Amino acid sequence: MAQILVVDDSQTMREIVCSFLKQNGFDVAQANDGRDGLRQLAFDPAIKLVVSDINMPNMDGLTMAEKIRTELGNAAVRIVMLTTEDNAEMRERGKAIGVTGWIVKPFRGEAVLGPFRKLCGL
């Protein structure tokens, strides 16, 4: 059972983020797009945090976040966007959906450890 679900269509990015989180004591699962992420979240109630890219094939990260809140009815899981997008309009859309945080790539692992632990209830 994972604490964090990392969703990114870039295998390299998923491996970087997952490896760093595992090295720092998190249980991590990964998904290759929003559709896969939604499916995994539906089957793993232990996930407390979703870290997702926005621009992905099949289902983008903001659509996935919206479906987490509406279709899955999951208001408890925290959602953080890890993306190259730093657009105020996208951030507002994310906030309206229930996105908890926004991190602009590149991923700086040390900077997220404290906040991720807090979001996971550790």
Image (cartoon, helix red, strand yellow):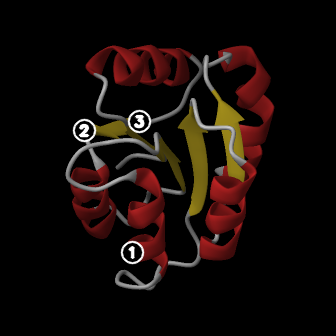
Image height check: is 42 above or below 103?
below
Q: Position of residue 105 (x, y in %)?
A: 61, 23
Q: Position of residue 14 (x, y in %)?
A: 37, 24
Find the distance from the CA under tag 3 to the CA under tag 2: 14 Å
> What residue sits right under mark 2 in the picture?
32
Q: Which residue is more in the foreground, 83 or 37?
A: 83
> What residue sits right under mark 3 in the picture?
28
Identify the residue shown where x is 71% and y is 50%.
101
Chain-order first, disc 1 or disc 2: 2
Identify the residue shown where x is 20% and y is 52%.
58
Mark 3: few/some/many CA within 10 Å (<14, 14-19, 20+)? some
Chain-order first, disc 1 or disc 3: 3
Q: Which residue is more in the foreground, 69 or 84?
A: 84
Find the distance from the CA under tag 1 to the CA under tag 2: 16 Å
Q: Quadrant of residue 27?
A: top left
Q: Position of residue 79 (x, y in %)?
A: 58, 56
Image height check: is 122 above or below 19?
below
Image height check: is 87 above or below 73?
above
> What residue sits right under mark 1 in the picture?
67
Identify the residue shown where x is 63% and y is 55%.
90
**What amino acid type should be assigned to the residue bearing mark 1?**
Lys
